[in-house]
């Protein structure tokens, strides 16, 4: 699923590498949820996560830290 990102404000994830490797950018969607893209591959597009999926992803990531 891909839509224009021109209206989205992406920010670098706080969990991204300080050296610029393994970087992920996240933008909150106006309808809730989030868009996620690779900082080094912005032209490749992004993944969209609806609210319920984004919450589940964050919950799982927190449990596995």
Image (spheres, rainbow, N blue to C red):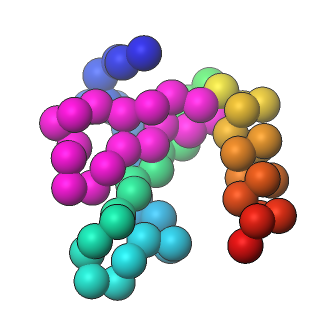
- For residue 28, say whether it is visible: yes
53 or 32: nearer the viewer: 53
- For residue 9, say whether it is visible: no
Please give the range of residues in magenta: 32-49
- In this rendering, is residue 38 above or below 20? above
- In this rendering, is residue 63 above or below 40? below
- In this rendering, is residue 60 above or below 51? below
In percent of width and height, residue 48 lies at 51, 28
63 or 9: nearer the viewer: 63
Q: Residue at x 73, y 73 (%)?
A: 65
State the image quarter where residue 57 is shown.
top right
Residue 15 as seen in the image, left or right of residue 55: left
In percent of width and height, residue 23 lies at 35, 64
- In this rendering, is residue 63 above or below 10? below
In the rendered image, the residue lying farthest to the front is 64
In percent of width and height, residue 2 lies at 36, 18
């Amino acid at each position: 699923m891909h839509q224009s990102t021109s209206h989205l404000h992406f920010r670098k994830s706080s969990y991204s590498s300080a050296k610029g490797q393994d970087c992920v950018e996240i933008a909150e969607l106006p309808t809730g949820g989030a868009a996620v893209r690779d900082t080094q591959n912005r032209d490749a597009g992004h993944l969209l996560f609806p609210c319920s999926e984004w919450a589940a992803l964050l919950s799982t990531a927190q449990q596995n830290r």
